[in-house]
Amino acid sequence: MENEPRGAIIQRDRETYAIVPRTPAGIVSPEHLENIVAVVRRYNIPVIKMTSGQRMVLVGLKKEDVEAVWNELGMTVGQATAPCVHYVQACPGTVVCKYGNQDSLGLGLALEEMYLDMNLPAKLKMGISGCPRCCGESYLRDIGVFGNAKGWTVIIGGNSGGRPRIGDVVAKNLSTDDAKDLVRRLLEYYRTHGRPGERTARFIERVGIGAIRKDVLTFAPYIPLEKPPTE
């Protein structure tokens, strides 16, 4: 919408705005926390809400204050509506969790940095979990990854919205580098073949997981080729 303040979402009252500062994989520094508290008090922002994507949304800003708040926060915009990667949700993984099999925070931060500015057919969310308990909601995100003792499992096509869908497992027991590469291949395939506004859940329903196996996995050198059936 023209003349709307940068990175702001008009609210129900049609007068105030919300902003979502970017917090990669849910990590917030002490400096950012201090800046958030300072601007909330200075500009009388009435609501700070934790989102499902491990971000803080500041709600109730006046239009004329939005740009000043961004400048004082010193944080970049966490996308909320654009057709791109909105966030990468990640559990603590091996950093602190006793159940962690893999470094989900490290992978989550790397994936967000790699694909933050990638243009896609629709908004996209990732969930990275350090173990099969999937606290990063990996099966319900457009791209999901979870770890076990042998490596990473990669999932595509999950959704938790009005038409929920459990994502399809694409590959198992991958190294970190191979998991990153497979996510890249899946996103590039989706970007090329997805329709405008089509989330991955609907995309997979349309093209079929067989197309992913044929057009993506066949060309991934770390995916073992299926042996033909024996008579």
Image (cartoon, rainbow, N blue to C red):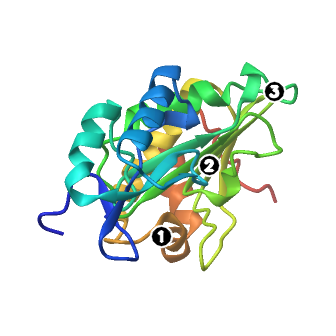
Cα distance, mark 1 to mark 2? 15 Å
Residue 78 coordinates in the image, percent (x, y): 39, 46
- The quadrant of the image that shows the C terminus is bottom right
Q: Which residue is mark 3?
A: 97
Residue 3 seen in this snapshot:
yes
Numbered disc 3: secondary structure: loop
**Which circle, 1 or 3, is nearer the viewer?**
3
Dividing the picture into quadrants, the one containing residue 140 is bottom right
Question: In this rendering, would 213 be left or right of 1?
Answer: right
Closer to the camera in the image, 82 or 15: 15
Upstream in sequence: badge 3 or badge 2:
3
Q: Tell me the tag on residue 50.
A: none
**Which circle, 1 or 2, is nearer the viewer?**
2
Question: In this rendering, would 71 be left or right of 21?
Answer: left
Q: What kind of residue is marked 2?
A: Gly
Cα distance, mark 1 to mark 3? 34 Å
